[in-house]
Image (cartoon, rainbow, N blue to C red):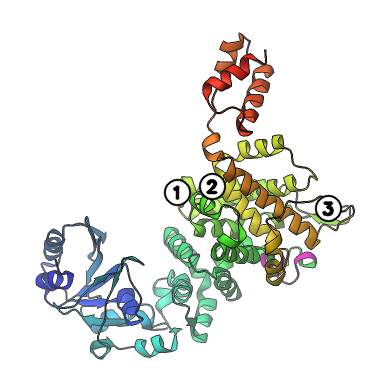
Amino acid sequence: MKLAAAITGVFGEVYLVGGALRDALLKRSFKDIDLAVPPSADFTARTRRLARRLGASCFPLDEENQVYRLTQRKAPFCQLDIMPFVGGSLGSDLRRRDFTINALALRLAPGAVFTPDKKAGGFRLRPDRAKVTDLAGGLKDLAAKKVRPVSPGIFTDDPVRLLRAFRVAAALDFRLTPAALEAVKKHSALIASTAQERVREELLRLFESPVSHKWLALMNKYGLLCAIFPDLAAQESCATAYYGKGGVLTHTLRVVERLDYLFENLPACLPGHKKVAELLPAPRLLKFAALLHDIAKPPKAAMINGRLRFFGHEEYGAIMAEKEMERLRFSREDIRLVSKIIGTHLRPGNLAANDLISDRALFRFFRAMGEYTVPLLVLSWADHASYVSARRLETMRRKLQDRPAPLPPGTPYNSPKKTLRYMQVLNLLFGVYIAKNMKSRSARLIDGNDVIKTLKLQEGPRVGELLEKIHLLQFEGKIKTRAHALKALKGMK
């Protein structure tokens, strides 16, 4: 069925608006189609009729304002958001939108062709620019690559637009106008008054940018980052002697920068990168973890023997991060992952501090971290990489796959040689984890009851010791089946 013909067949006068039209004008693909129609008494009935014609589900996003979403159940899985004009007319609707580049409308013709984009997903459309309704100069701003508010009141009308401005600019690689940035600075505190799940979604979409760290830095410059995360404000004045201007927050943003770099250069940086990618959560979630990984450094900062230390910041940071994620309405699964890797993000470095790393130490590390191993290693990689410049990291990259050698005695704690050694250990951990297929091997072949029954033992520490030996043999690849495990167990009696 031809999509445009189906839509116009039900509604007659209907306009393509918002991000779909904007992206079409930029010759980009788009996944969601936003439509606006004149108000009518039978709007809901027409919407449901269109859903039946398209074979789509239909549910209200906002019943009060009659905003409906239609999602096709079969390919091409089109998603339509449709609503009557806000304010009763097309002109009033466009003037109430957020940014000029989104305040555009094109009357949909029955013959308009939405071409599926199989490579990028979504659709492509070739709109006639001469027929676009533009009341706020959006076409000019599209050409100039600018994000400009439609009116001064857009941020007070809906404070989530404070963050959306950065997200839209990041997605399009546009720039925010000076007036927009000053308005963000003036109204940044309002972000706390909006629904926090909307803040979460805008923030996660911003993290999809390959240079998300630049947008976070700009948000921080104009007061929005710390308005969203007030606990980050204390980082700017913490440990400035060590991290330089901006203190811990400078380090935090650099860790996000290194994750941006890593995800854009995964094949060149990590052994077994394809397997690593399969075991990773969405990169945007790991960037979020990087943003909060040192959130507890300011409250845990203390001078010990003349050196600034942050003992316990990782465990306390996990607690603080969990509270932040609960406020932003993250899923329990996402909260567990982020709090786990923040709470253990020093563990790979502690392992790397040893001159020799035994199979037993590797086994214990993988066993302790389980399914969180690869996400933790990625966060740790970015954390350690942040201690060298981007240029030095490029020169180090060809050495990252080398076997880690012990550090010379007296190597300074902030030496690039130490960073290289630690990152080589991380690459070793990646390589061993992938080579030994630790995800499948983490499933234990036997348990404590098997030990007790096979060797006729009483419950006690001895049972745990024997299990540890069996699991180590499994890690080393010396036993691969339950039968092998039970046979090895009998030999330990």
Q: Tell me if I can see residue 343 in this picture.
A: no
Count of labels shown? 3
Q: Nearer the viewer, residue 149 or 481?
A: 481
Residue under numbered circle 1: 331
Q: Kindly identify the amino acid type of the residue bearing the numbered disc 3.
A: Leu
Residue under numbered circle 2: 337
Q: Is residue 309 left or right of residue 93?
A: right
Say which residue appears at 67% left-offset and 49% top-offset: 428
Q: Quadrant of residue 89?
A: bottom left
User: Neighbour class for label 3 at 10 Å: few (<14), some, many (≥20)?
Assistant: some
Could you tell me which quadrant the C terminus lies in?
top right
Which circle's residue, 2 or 3, is located before the other in the chain?
2
Q: Position of residue 115 (x, y in %)?
A: 25, 72
Q: Confirm whether the magenta stretch covers residue 465.
A: no
Q: Kindly identify the amino acid type of the residue bearing the numbered disc 2.
A: Leu
Residue under numbered circle 3: 407
